[in-house]
Amino acid sequence: MEIFINRMEVENVTQVIQESVRMLEMLPESEQELASQLIKRLVIAWDPDFTKLTPEERQRLEAAEQRIDNGEYVKDCDIEW
C-alpha cells in the first residue's frame, strides 16, 4: 500500500505523521492492514462519533464562520431557485 499526499497538505503534516507513514511503508502489506486497523480503533476510541476537530480543522471552521459573519457568503434563502 503506497500512501500519496497532496502537495498542498505536505506542509501541514507533522514529523510524527511523516515518520509513521515511512515506517508503515516498510511493513509487508498484510502488516500494513493490521496497523491500519489499529489506527482506526485508536481514532474511534478518541472520537467515537467523529465530532472532534483537529487544530487545523478548528482554524478552518473559525475562518469560515468569520467569513459568514462578514457577509462574504450568500444565504440560500436569498437565491431565487
Image: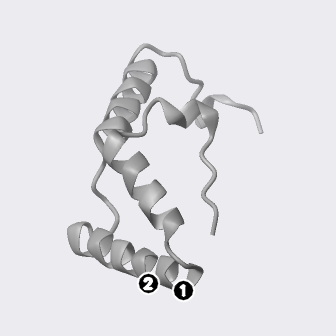
The C terminus is located in which quarter? top right
Q: Position of residue 18 (x, y in %)?
A: 42, 47
Residue drawn at x 33%, y 30% as measured from the top left:
59
Mark 2 crowdedness (10 Å alpha carbons): few <14, some 14-19, many ≥20: few
Q: Position of residue 77 (x, y in %)?
A: 60, 36
How many numbered marks, from 0 up?
Answer: 2
| Residue of label 1 | 30
Amino acid found under the numbered disc labelled 2: Leu
Seen from the viewer's position, the closer of residues 31 and 52 is 31
* Horizontal relation, residue 64 to residue 54: left or right: right
Amino acid found under the numbered disc labelled 1: Ser
**Residue 63 quadrant:** top left
Residue drawn at x 43%, y 61% as measured from the top left:
23
Mark 1 crowdedness (10 Å alpha carbons): few <14, some 14-19, many ≥20: few
| Residue of label 2 | 34
Decide: is 43 above or below 31.
above
Seen from the viewer's position, the closer of residues 25 and 7 is 25
Q: Which mark is residue 68?
A: none
Seen from the viewer's position, the closer of residues 79 and 30 is 30
